[in-house]
Amino acid sequence: MSAVLDDAVALGRRVGVALSDDELRRIAERIGRVPTVTELFAFDAQWSEHCSYKSSREHLRKLPTEGPDVLLGVGEDAGIVRLGEWNGETYGVVVAHESHNHPSQVVPFEGAATGIGGIVRDVLCMGAEVIGVADPLRFGRLDNEHCRYVAQSVVDGIAAYGNAIGVPNVGGDVFVDESFDDNVLVNVVALGLVKANEIIHSRAPAGSAGWDIVLVGKATDRSGFGGASFSSLTLDEEDADQNKGAVQVPDPFLKNVIMRATYAVFAELRAQNVEAGFKDLGAGGLAGCSAELCAAGGMGAEVELERVPTAQRDLPPEVIAIGETQERLCWIVPPSFTPLLLEIYNDVFGLPRVARGACAAEIGKVTESGRYVARHRGETVMDVDLAFLTGGVRYRREYTLPHVRRESEAERERTLADADRARPGSLGERLRAVLAHRDVCSRAAIYTRYDGVVRGCTAIPPGYADAGVLVPIPGAPLAAATGIGGNPRYGKIDPRGAAELAVAEAIGHVAAVGARAVGLTDCLNFGDPTVPEHMGAFVAAVNGLADAARHFDVPFVSGNVSLYNRSSSGRHVAPSPIVGAIGVMADVAASATMAFKRAGSPIVLTAPLQTAFGGSVIAELLALETTTLPDLRAHAFAKQCALVIACLERGAIGAAHLVTDGGVLAALAKMAFASEDGLGFRIDPRPLAEPAGHELAWFSETPAFAVEVLDVAAFTELAAQHGVPGYDAGETLAEPVALLGEERVALDELRDAWEAPLRDFYGAVRA
Amino acid sequence: MSARVAVLVFPGTNSEDETLRGLHAVGLDAALVHWSQPDALPHFDAYVLPGGFAHEDRVRAGAAAAHEALMDPVIEAAQAGKFVLGICNGAQILAEAGLVPGTGPLRRPTAAFAPNASGRFASLHVHIKLAVAPDRVPILAGIEPDAVIPAWASHGDGRLAAPPDELARMARDGHVAFVYADRHGTPVPAANGSALGAAALVNRAGTVLAVMPHPERDAWTFQHLGATRRREAMLEPSGGIRLFACFARALNGRAA
């Protein structure tokens, strides 16, 4: 046996899989022979960090995943939360979250585009209509030519793909940090709409032995071979060209047609009351997808690889089985339904005429064996225990939790006073600098590249409010909102605190448009799990997510982990727990943009301002040495969210905006910029800060909302009901100015400072 | 008998559903006609070409679709004086088919919706203002002079481009049906660099209209982003729906 184990290791090293020697031995020992090359690549993909969560799983268990609004929890391609009832039926919002970090660093346009392509399939395969996407992006420094190229190409790729398939981009965020210079983060959230009784599961249905396995989509080629294990390796400059082959090639045009054809298939399945299994092909390709489908249903599979439509002749079996060619999906249907399924894709929607070689084809059968068997030209190239293949491995990684020093209040006061003296400036001067900061400035150059309104269901597109709002069922008032949270400046200082604040931020963003968060989705982007400090940052962040989610009583319903975000130069990304919140509202009438609606409205803050400036924009601008993040105070923050939602329902406030990067004044300036008639604002002379009144508190990033009060009596009543004291901060003005105490600054001047940094994101516009 | 409207779906079209909803909202008997059903096409009274990226916008935006057989019955209908409305990609297809401005040979366009001045796709909320006399556009029966309609300009190729003499002719003969404007109706330069500030073109007879921005994306109160949207009427059609309402009035006027 030991010769077999050694041969397995030697073969593994020769064909270049990422499996460790130890993992290769375990595989050979279990299957009792030297694995075939195809098997090796299948295990390589299934046991990769990307597919198996082998380092992260034991920690992810801590996340709360259950709640009354969860229609389908973690475990399939996407989670589903309750949207509401309409015409006697329960509707759900499908939520999936994915990262495409490594591909986007190597081939940014294709990497980002296929990120959208993949996540859209994850939602589609739940039986859902795809209704929106949102992109959290983390770019390297934009004054670096290569980083800028990567950033532009990522945005181009997202735009090209999402716009063409006709799915609106309704949210996201952008941060810029040097830790992303070698390692861009491209996360993507996708949303779908499905009736609760029409969900299709990513598994072979019970009693499906003898059913057909049908592969749909693009002809299989060599693109994307080895993608899963590539995404689980450290990026090495020297391998960049080689790795390009591991990135898939997007075809949004074909996807547009496949989506529409698939909706037609859904309609037929429902009309005929036929059960089916459906899953998208992502990491691990055909073998990975069909194996997971059959394993989830406790079945087995027999697949004939030569029946897989290919774009090239003589593709080796491991490429056919494991390659990650894009735009493919896999159905499990009873044989009686297969002819109609093939007709819809191949004839009615004419896939072969849309893209060369694209089609739907029956490629195998479900079995009861519990084994995955694949044959190629008469030879058995895979014959493995399915549970063993898809069960993956688990690691208990060593970790060192980060030590975060929180200064005493007195220390912080001293630091603040010193910095204020060392870098004096008026409120207006500081506000201009804050608005021009890379993480505060206008993102219009980016989000206007995305179609946010296709499908005609968008109530609030990107740029108009804290969260995008969709009205996904035509004729129904039910609305869904999606908000994003996560701040790399916080992550660098305190991964746990950053994670808690990311949850609060995401929930706060949907509250600001009037929606109650019912589900969370996370993408955890970290460094190398074999380095105890990196693993420790990950563990700390998961602890923070779990605690915050429990405090707010909102469960996680989907997520993704991206590790090894570290380049060969040793640089690793800022610990980046990125959180999306899905909010729902019974009536879209309560939704509001963040724009000030009329002059003379009181401006109120929903919490006193903290003087904890760790990771804040003003701290960076004033070179404040501090590592104390704003305190979440989850209980109070939850009450603030409830108040904002209640006020929007009653029409007591006209606009709400969560205080985030840049603090209160930046928030007020953005509310003014968004106003239709160029409204301005004035602030009260002293901010309501604790401890009292330092002027810099206007730049505090305290978790709180700035609201424009339209009906003072109603607001006062609701605030008392919710136990949230309002803190007067100022008033909206008819004149386009910011009155900051004695200082008067033209809003145009502030707007210019805010718009200038990314105005030339693509370079000067040609005349 | 009420007029029947076909909404064409090419491979790559992506705005068919909301366009259909808009047409239904103004009481029209409209249906999607998929590219696999060419035989159904001749039997309609009017045609609407919705937005998207038909045939991946290969060669030029709208060009491949304009040259495929599916367009034959639409071109015939247009020549017979039936109403044809194109929105965004549909507008590009009508230009490439030579139906707007319609002053040259078929499928040999004299004007095109070329790549935006920025060279990039942009999605911006806009207003468009009627730039011709109402009687110049019988396809929009009852539209008020100087009508201002909210819409979304969501395109990469919306810049009207043509040789200078052709542009002069289009201006003179009233082929620029709508121009970009602010919400009060004051014309503004087109963000995409469109010649003559053009947002829409119409043929000589006023029966074929090619509109670049999407009125159907700001056609329900919940889609309005201004300060004054009426909360009590969030699910009612308003705003951009007026363009569809005028189209319906034109069709019903003919059917009567």
Image: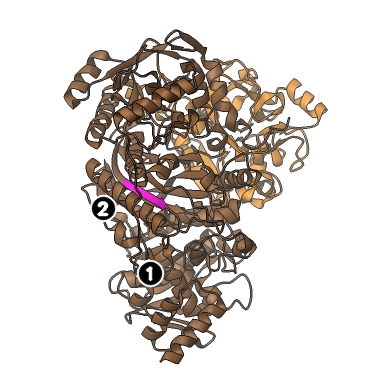
| Along the viewing direction, whichever of A104 and A717 lies nearer the viewer | A104
Is A609 displayed left or right of A285 in the figure?
Answer: left
Residue A269, image x, y percentages = 36, 61
Q: Is residue A213 magenta?
A: no
Q: Quadrant of residue A225?
A: bottom right
Mark closer to the chain start, 2 or 1:
2
Q: Residue at x 48, y 78 (%)?
A: A40
Q: Colour of chain A?
A: brown
Judging by the rendered image, the residue that carries numbered circle 2 is A65
Please tell me which residue lies in front, A53 or A534. Answer: A534
Specify the segment rendered in magenta: A520-525
- Residue where numbered disc 1 is placed: A292
Q: Is residue A572 above or below residue A388?
A: above
Tell which subunit mark 2 falls on.
A
- Residue A268 coordinates in the image, percent (x, y): 39, 59
In the rendered view, tell whether residue B57 sits above or below residue A249: above
Q: Amino acid at mark 1?
A: Glu
Q: Helix or strand or loop: what does disc 1 sit on?
A: helix
Q: Is residue A304 visible?
A: no
In this rendering, does residue A7 appear at all? Answer: yes
